[in-house]
Image (spheres, rainbow, N blue to C red):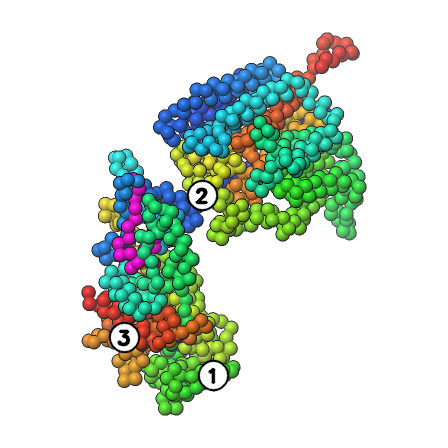
Amino acid sequence: MNQPIRRLALFSLALFGVLLLNITWIQAIQAESLREHPLNNRQYVDRLTVPRGPIVAGNEQVAFSELDEESEMYQRVYEGGELYSHVVGTFRTTGANGIEQTENSFLDGSDSRLVVRNFLDMLTGQESQGATVNLTIDPAAQQAAMDALQATGKHGAAVALDPSTGAVLASVSLPSFDPNSVSSVTDSGTAAANWGELEQDEAQPLLNRAFNQTYPPGSTFKIVTAAAALEDGATPESTQDAPEVLNLPAGGTMPNAFGAPCNNGSPDSLAHSIEISCNTSMANWAISLGEQKMAEQAEAFGFDTGEMGIPVPVAPSSYPSGLDDSQLGQTGIGQFDVRATPLQMAMVAAGVANDGTVMKPYLVDSVQGPDLSEITSANPEVYSEAVSSSTAEDLKDMMLLVTEGAEGSGTNGAIPGIQVAGKTGTAENGSGATHNWFISFAPADDPQVAVAVVIEHGGGSGNELAAPVARSIMEAVINE
Amino acid sequence: MSDALSTALPPVKRRNAELVMLLLAIGVTLFAFAEAGLTRNGELPPGLFAYGVTFGGLSLLAHVFIRFFAPWADPLLLPLATVLNGLGLAMIWRLLDATGDTENGSAMSQLIWTAISMIVFALIVFFLKEPRILQRYPYIMALSAVVLLLLPLIPGLGMTINGARQWISIPGLGSMQPSEFAKIALVIFLSGYMVTKRDVLSLASRRVKIGPVKIIDLPRMRDTAPMAVAWGFCIIVMVALMNDLGTSLLLFGTFLAMIYVATQRSSWIIIGLAAFFGACLALYPLVYHFSVRVDTWLNAFDPDVYNGELGANSQQLVRGLFAMGEGGILGTGLGGGKPGNVPEVQNDFIFTAFGEELGLTGCMVILLTLALLVQRGMRIALASRELFVKMFASGISFLLGFQSFVVIGGVTRVIPMTGATIPFVAKGGSALLASWIMLALLVRMSNNARKPAPQAIQDEGATQVISR
């Protein structure tokens, strides 16, 4: 019976071989990602005794660590409270989120690019320090967005991008919360309880609506429809039937919001349809273009391209598929199952502003070592070539009519002395009053900022509720 | 016989080599103690001298004992067991005593159990001159194995810990895990039984053919009875009544290995595995404890599973992996990590504490030590001449190896967690004692296998007088 014993011995050896391979996988290859796993609270608990680098917006430290003399632990302080909470995130004893999580290895100094310096610090007996993370956020724009959004008294979100780079200049989500209330190291019990309460809160204050909530974009999506039409060879003067109520081909009807035909009953031009936000003609555009061209155009702006990390996670926006002609018509005005994050709609505006090129959004401008040497620096990337520059030019002219035209539907977005290109949206949804949108960019001839604002269940119009918010953000950026 | 000759071990004692390796093992242990104490509390552990004298002294006594009573024993066995036991002891001291956590026991009780184990080790080596006498009582062994396994089911005596009913409480002595000893009794029974039934189990068969192609030789229906009994026992009693997945898996795995060694027929393994996994699939939705284990294994990193209710979440498993990730390649050094983040780390999850503090390097050392121990055991089985001893030695070695795989594979997420202890390393008196009993049996069998065959008294003449 020696042969089976030999085989059994080999089999036992193979079992140990499996274990050896597995621990090598865990401890050598996966170790880094295990250490940074979101469920792993060691990275937070263990490192409360190390000074963490600050997070900076503009010239302000919006998050920094302060030594608590009594407990000898470093307390994270969030200057500005709820103003930056969704972007910066929180650093708690039980976890972290936002930039605090995604840039943790820089902030706590464990990143390999900081290791040599830390080693030197150890040799010289100096305390090692984390790196400084500089955000792209413009404090003035952020404050303007927060103030204007709070003035509406509703839930909602606003995002501002620099169209030429993709840098996020402002990102606000309401309701918000004060990160200082959940990050105490000396009273971690209360902090954890507060966090638990926020998690349970039905208003979802922890949800970053700007990046992680999708809404039906409503009429702001008409920009995408118009882009698809122009790319297909149409001109701003091309027309479609624009009755007061459109009988959809596969059943159902679609009325215009203002209860009248768009061009006194005659077919309406694309430019005029955008200016007055005509539903029926834009639905006809979508139907005549077909699902594939619509989907391709949406994708070119960033829909259906999966989750993004900028570096904080961004939920995917989606354009539906498998549509009948009625549904297709509805997607032409951003209804049916079209879903977009505010960031996605800001990317649409930014793409038009930047001659048709959408830049990849990003939040971290640079990372500096404790000695102020630059460790990483943002490198603006092209996200997609959404439309040709002539199409972008046409779209810009149409969007200018929205704020400046005789029948403009978004005149509240206009800024005296500066040309603003915009588009309103009022989105029906299954769960209550309409969501009110405004997307825009300015100045039209040299765009510095592109904005998307959504007022959750505002129940008014985009012009009424969202456009003033967008305007004050744009003003804050331009007036600097 | 030529087969046996080719596998014979060289007739050398190598006792001095054993002594050197043993001193190394004791040195490693004491160094581990010192390092843990210095890192944790900035001073040498206050009990270092006492631990050193007791543990080192006992191990050296065991060595002297082997010198006298089993001089031909394999020289690797004792040092390997000693270094595992010593590292376990140091880690338990570091986890419990050094952190002031004395609720979960202390290294002192582990040291006492080490002493008891070594005494039992000596007694077995001394009294059990010929392991084959165990062959005479297969059914008594089977009965005692079953009784030991079922003891925890007796109301008042049995205790349920962490969902598994595998403990009994003895007033004044604390808790025991009788299944640890049942495993050994079962290996003895199977060795004796298989040796006698070997021919019928291996030869009588029905050949399954498709056309002219031979597919498999199936055993006759009536010969599958032992398999059916083992299967029924493992599934119904162990899993359904006692929730003791670990022991069930161990026993059935060892059973399959031994029937394979006896018969050299893969059809037994195929039938056995099919029956076992079939039963597992059927029981999966029915036994709550079972589905919990599988769910926490497959979806360990799902936040809902991680934060699930007490006893049904993957926190222990995932935190164990985090601990190992924290350790990386070189570890934090003994005493430098935070292994206490893993709940109940001193028991099944002690491996993750090694992973964190000694890193991949230390874990590899432990795994290789265990693997070497198993391979030495298998080597003894090869070198032995009697069928019963071959079965017995290979059975025990496989049990040691498979048990290590089940528990370490469980905590490192290769297989679902089942609950078992790393031989020699983990905290627990019964487990430690059972490990040392197995070591004593291996030492005795290796001595007999390596001892030179009896010499002829005279060089010439036809008649030889054999002395034994």
**Magenta residues (range):** A72-91
Q: At 49% across and 79% down in the image, what residue appears?
A: A325
Give a yes or no on whether discs 1 and 2 share a subunit: no
Where A18 sits versus A58, above or below?
Answer: above
Which amino acid type is marked by label 1? Answer: Thr
- B39 or A294: nearer the eye? B39
Give a yes or no on whether discs 2 and 3 share a subunit: no
Where A453 sits versus A72, above or below?
Answer: below
Say whether residue A221 is visible.
no
**Earlier residue among tags 3 and 1:** 1
Q: At 54% across and 44% down in the image, what residue appears?
A: B414
Residue B369: percent from the left, percent from the top?
Answer: 53, 30
> Which element type, helix, strand or loop, lies under badge 3?
helix
Left or right: where B216 falls relative to B291: right
> Which element type, helix, strand or loop, lies under badge 2?
helix
Residue B400: percent from the left, percent from the top?
Answer: 60, 32
Q: Which residue is mark 3?
A: A413
Give a yes or no on whether discs 3 and 1 share a subunit: yes
Rounded to the nearest angstrom, the CA distance separating label 2 from label 3 is 52 Å
> Which element type, helix, strand or loop, lies under badge 1?
strand
Residue A81 magenta-drawn?
yes
Chain letter of disc 1?
A
Q: Quadrant of the N terminus of chain A?
A: top right
Residue A298: percent from the left, percent from the top?
Answer: 41, 71
Chain letter of disc 2?
B
- A192 or B34: nearer the eye? A192
Rounded to the nearest angstrom, the CA distance separating label 1 from label 2 is 57 Å
